[in-house]
Image (tube, coloured by chain):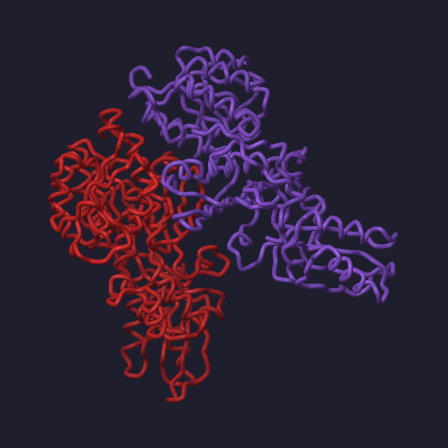
Chain colours: A purple, B red
Amino acid sequence: MENNKLKIGIIGLGTVGQGVVKVLSKYDDIEIVSAAVKNINKQREVTVQNLTQDPYELARNADIDVIVEVAGGCEILDVLVEAVKNKKHIVMANKELLARHGAMLFDLAKENGVSILYEAAVAGGIPIIMPIKTSLKANSFNFVAGILNGTTNYILTKMEEENLSYEECLKKAQELGYAEADPWSDVEGYDAMYKIAILANIVFNKRIDINKIYREGITKITAFDIQIADELGYKIKLIAQAKKAQYDNKEMLDIRVHPMLVQKSKAISEIKNATNAVMLDGFPVDKVMFVGPGAGQFPTSSSVAGDILTLKAEINRREEILPLMACHHSVYAEQADIEDTINCYYIRISTRNNPGEIGKIGTACGEFGINLSCIIQKGTNQDGSATIIVITENSIEKNINKMINKLESDNYTKIVNKIRVM
Amino acid sequence: MENNKLKIGIIGLGTVGQGVVKVLSKYDDIEIVSAAVKNINKQREVTVQNLTQDPYELARNADIDVIVEVAGGCEILDVLVEAVKNKKHIVMANKELLARHGAMLFDLAKENGVSILYEAAVAGGIPIIMPIKTSLKANSFNFVAGILNGTTNYILTKMEEENLSYEECLKKAQELGYAEADPWSDVEGYDAMYKIAILANIVFNKRIDINKIYREGITKITAFDIQIADELGYKIKLIAQAKKAQYDNKEMLDIRVHPMLVQKSKAISEIKNATNAVMLDGFPVDKVMFVGPGAGQFPTSSSVAGDILTLKAEINRREEILPLMACHHSVYAEQADIEDTINCYYIRISTRNNPGEIGKIGTACGEFGINLSCIIQKGTNQDGSATIIVITENSIEKNINKMINKLESDNYTKIVNKIRVM
């Protein structure tokens, strides 16, 4: 940091990258030395003096103190590795790369005495990484959960408020820029999975294997499920969660992303549209919740700029900077298999409209030790079939699956949807 | 910090002080050297080796790195001044002292190169000071507001849920330990006023004169007001807020604490019982909200311990520690007078049950340029009087007061309650 100016190289000048340039423009003591982009001649809202198509130039530029990585994707990993080896601090928003390769990158940062900050990687503009690592540092947490994907929350909110199908709401979200042309990563829960992996990592101080995270998106949720849930006092949300649990007498981390019925009395059920929320439960703090914009040019830039300003206040003043923000663990978590987890379930069953069907369901549940807290038949369908909805008490997932197999073994009963209850 | 052990002196071993001792007990590298208490022989849940009745002993003890002040009250100021002059860092939860004497104390800390951290002073266990000063540092805020007092929120929640009087709910709160025997500071809004002064200070980077903060408690709110508000789609909350506003063509800070009607669709209306919430609105982040326990032994200890661990990570490693956490401003804010502020109002009027009364109200409003968005008469009272409720559109407070004076100039009309609308 020469002349007290912090020199920055930005990788990626898309929506977020341009936001970061705008937000940093008011700081005379921060200089954007160069930016790496795919297309140099593209029209942009901001001007950066030196554009390059080669991000390695930034990683090797002796004039740069901090690399801001807002390009996304895992291909950029090698560039960041090179930057860290060249003693550059990293500020990044790349959740997928952090969830997949964070452990390696954090180790390398420690070796090279640099910081990696990533407030923007989880829940956009909401401060969550820094509070967990500083103000909440004395806590032992047993639970972190959230609505971490704005696209799916927007779609579910619209389905509920306007009684529209998933497909119609996805189209609306795409028109408004809330969903990408290829919405796969959002609607199938991958984006939320990366984020809960990052949160679980810092909340439980354990490495997380994302391949062991159970993941289910929102594509199978129908307006009918949302309506039934509403009648029963629930909303349907895509919840990403990680909690300490004892399964089979073993202390595990139960980490997963899937739709859930959330009681309307819970504050998280009120999180609407593209808003994100993160809940934590620990000792001594008890329950806290953080709510705010989970994406967007400016909210994301707020977090990136906050990291840069935090670094700037620390940099070049002593050898080890921001010790609390470093990764201090290297042990992998014992992660639970979804089959062993315990949940309540909403199960929508299509079957024959025969007098004995409810009895059959009750018998099958009894056989696998499943107690029901609610069973309702929603009239008769036009094709003569009957729709029956059950809500179970706490049951082991594998027993639920066995019960479902049993019910589906006749050729007229079908489980249309199975949604866990929060 | 000898032998890598952080040495602490605690002033006050009440509920919070004992919580801090419990929470810190798991850290081998933090030593509680001594505690200052009023009564040495009192039975306590924790043991501290050296107890003294003289807090100056701690301020002068060369062995102590950090003074943790959880005694409360302004009499402790001189002790903290002496501690800062002796180069001790301060971690404190004392909102009144910070709101009244923070400016002086922060100046002194800067002179002496020490840090004053006070995460626990506002909103108990919720991380809010540190996020504003770090992750959200790039923002320019125009609004901060919150439910910052758990006692009054508990009372209002109970009044609403159980349709009980203020007095009954206060008694309940006292029985449960949510309200003190002398509830004055809480129910009259002083506690929330100190907290919003501290928040406004760091959110707007201006010194705040608490004598210029308009303050009104909850003692005049009745179950009837809550019921009418409910029918109109509102809840009544004690809101502390600070916002940038243009009044009389001047940029002002409008800071105040008073009950408000809050639309049920706003998330803050859902904050129940002793829970606190802080909302911020700024650029680039947009709106964020933090929710959690606003008081209590352990939540408060979480914040105190977070500050201590943050200090510990920084201390003795370089000359200027935690530069972002210091106070960097010395200019007082232009604070708005409540008479100049613009609000919507809920006004409950008791008058004669005569055909002309609604017309009179409408005429008086018209005379002072006040538009009404709602006017309802709630039947006739047993004494023959009529209760009329109006909700106004945005109006200047002094015009509202003139209109009220005009209405009250006959000898049968009385304004029973005036509550601002969020």
What is the x, y in percent for residue B4?
27, 29
Above or below, comparing residue A208 to residue A231 in the picture: above
Quarter that holds the N terminus of chain B: top left
Rendered residue at 39%/42% (across/down): A136
Nearest the viewer among B192 and B73 is B73
What is the x, y in percent for residue B422?
41, 58
Left or right of residue A277, residue A3 in this image: left
Nearest the viewer among A108 and B189 is A108
How many circles with numbers are drawn on the protein? 0
Left or right of residue B335, residue B161 in this image: right
Above or below, comparing residue B253 to residue A205 in the picture: below
Nearest the viewer among B211 and B307 is B307
Left or right of residue B193, residue A336 in this image: right
Rendered residue at 22%/25% (across/down): B319
- Residue A329 seen in the figure: yes
Rendered residue at 41%/10% (across/down): A62
Above or below, comparing residue B372 to residue B322 in the picture: below
What is the x, y in percent for residue B99?
22, 49
